[in-house]
Image (tube, rainbow, N blue to C red):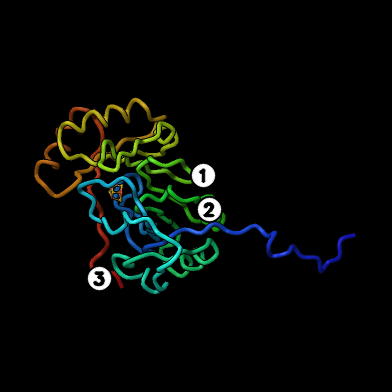
Amino acid sequence: MIPATASVPSSLRPTESVVPVQAITEGLVPYGTWAGMPAVIIRLQGCPVACPWCDQPNLWLMPTHDDQVGEEELEQPGGANGWRWLNTTRLLALVESLQAHAHVLITGGEPCLWDLRDLTRALLNRGSTCQVETSGVAPLQIDPDCWLTLSPKHNQPGGMQVLPGAYRRANEIVLCVGGDEDGRWIDRAAKERSCCEVFICPRDDQPEARAACWRLARSRSCRISLPMVYPAPEVAA
Ligand code: SF4
C-alpha cells in the first residue's frame, strides 16, 4: 500500500507552463462576434509578424528570461514597458481579482508563440469563456473549447505565413483592410474557413481604409466591425 504521506519529488512534478505577460487589464473586446463584451485582456509579449501599421511595436521584442518587470506594472493602462513570466496559477489569481473575468481575451503580440493549453483549460474550468486572438502564423497550442479569433496578416515584413489549419479552426475571422487590394484576402478566408463568419475592419483611421472597407463589405456581403474602445476613465469606476 502506498503511504498517505507519499509525495512526488519536486524534480518529478509536472511544471506549469509560463507565458510572458505584458499587460493584464479590463476592457472591451474590440472586434467581431464578442465586440463590446467587458473582458479581462491578457496581452502576451513577442511578435515576429511586423505589420507596418501595428500600433504596439513595443510588443514585437521577443522576451528573454531576464529583465522582468514588476507585476504591478502589468496593470498600467497600455501595459508594462516589458513583460513578466507568469504561470497559470498566478495568472488565474490575477484574472479572478478583476471584475470582468466572465470573459478572458488572450492576445498579443502573437499569443500562439506560447503553449496556452494549461492556461486556456484552467480558464474554461473556472467558468470563463476564453478567447484567443492570433495572426495564425504559429501552431495552435490552445484548448479545443477556446473561441479562436483569426486575424490573418499576409505578406508582412516579418515573412511569416498564415498556417492553413488556422482557417479551419477559427470561430471567426477578422481581417484588417487598408485598400481594395485586400479583397483577395477576404476571398481566401471565405474559401478556407470552415463555416465561421468573416468580419473586416479598417486597419487605421485613414479615410481610404474606411472607404475600402465599405466597398469590400458591399461587394462581398461581409460585416464591418469597428473597434470598440475602453470606456473613458470618468465612467469606468
Ligand atoms: S500581428 Fe498584431 S502585434 Fe504583431 S505586428 Fe501585426 S498588428 Fe502588431
- Nearer to the camera, 186 or 67: 67
Callout 1, which amino acid? Asp
Residue name at image x 23 percent, y 28 percent: 184
User: Residue 198: percent from the left, percent from the top?
Assistant: 31, 35
Which residue is label 1 attached to? Answer: 145
Callout 3 crowding tier (Cα within 10 Å): few <14, some 14–19, many ≥20: few
Residue 201 placement: quadrant: top left
Residue 127 visible in the current orientation: no
- The numbered dot on residue 17 is none
Q: Give the mark nearer the N terminus: 3 vs 1.
A: 1
Which residue is label 2 attached to? Answer: 124
Q: CA distance from mark 1 to mark 2?
A: 8 Å
Q: Give the mark nearer the N terminus: 3 vs 2.
A: 2
- Nearer to the camera, 71 or 97: 71
Quadrant (top left/top right/bottom left/bottom right) for the N terminus: bottom right
User: Residue 219: percent from the left, percent from the top?
Assistant: 18, 27
Residue 46 lies left or right of residue 179; in this view the side is right
Which residue is label 3 attached to? Answer: 233
Callout 2, which amino acid? Leu
